[in-house]
Amino acid sequence: LGSNSPPTRRDGQSILCEVNKFDDMIDYISVLRPGFSQVIAVDENFRLFQRAWCVAELYAAFSLGLKQTIVLLSSSTLDKHQSELLQLRIEDMGSSNPADKAMILSKIDDREGFDNGLQRMIMDESGLLRSWRGDQDIIAYIGVVAKRSHHRDESQPSESQPDMV
């Protein structure tokens, strides 16, 4: 259903449309559940970042200061798409329904400011990719520690085996 399909609200937006309710819902959830966080699962081709309503929802949560965690398939998929992330512009993104994209764009007074904020959300020191890389570093460190522990266990005689003199 489109963003202006009947029945409509007073502002002309469809009551049945899913897209036009996110701003209200994320505001409500952020007040109702202050510890609420958002998990962002990114597809292999990073299509998520090509969809206007997906990016607008991510940015709305970011603007409210909600904790966001990103899940990527691998660092190689990030490497493949990182240059695309640096070029993101809300006006270049698509939607299934042109009316939905028009509605999303109509809510953004300063599109250049939005695009800059989007870059901060993704790329900054505390942005989505930095936190993801941090998690990867922790996972890699845990792997190193586990590997060392395994090698140490293999090199030490077990308690059931007598020491050879």
Image (cartoon, rainbow, N blue to C red):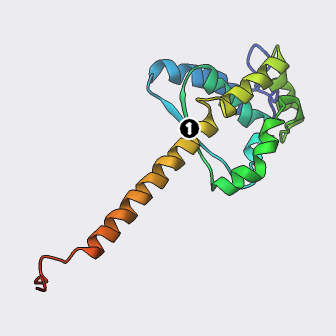
**Residue ID at (73%, 29%):** 119
- Judge whether residue 17 can be spotted in this image: no
- Tell me which amino acid carries mark 1: Ser
Compared across the picture, whether 142 is left or right of 61 comes to: left
The quadrant of the picture occupied by the C terminus is: bottom left
Compared across the picture, whether 67 is left or right of 92 comes to: left
Q: On the image, which quarter does residue 103 sit in?
A: top right
Q: On the image, which quarter does residue 132 sit in?
A: top right
In the rendered image, the residue lying farthest to the bottom is: 164
**Residue ID at (73%, 28%):** 118
Compared across the picture, whether 40 is left or right of 162 comes to: right
In the rendered image, the residue lying farthest to the front is: 165
Front residue of this view, candidates 35 and 135: 135
Is label 1 in a helix, a strand or a loop?
helix
**Residue ID at (73%, 34%):** 55
Q: Which residue is mark 1?
A: 131
Answer above or below: position of 81 versus 98.
below
Answer above or below: position of 1 versus 145.
above
The quadrant of the picture occupied by the N terminus is: top right
**Residue ID at (38%, 57%):** 145
Residue 46 percent coordinates (x, y): 74, 48
Front residue of this view, candidates 155 and 85: 155
- Judge whether residue 9 can be spotted in this image: yes
Label 1 Cα neighbours within 10 Å, binned few <14 / some 14-19 / many ≥20:
some
Residue 114 percent coordinates (x, y): 77, 21
Compared across the picture, whether 2 is left or right of 42 comes to: right
Residue 61 percent coordinates (x, y): 61, 26
Answer above or below: position of 79 versus 132.
below
Q: On the image, which quarter does residue 15 sit in?
A: top right
Residue 143 percent coordinates (x, y): 43, 59
Front residue of this view, candidates 102 and 119: 119
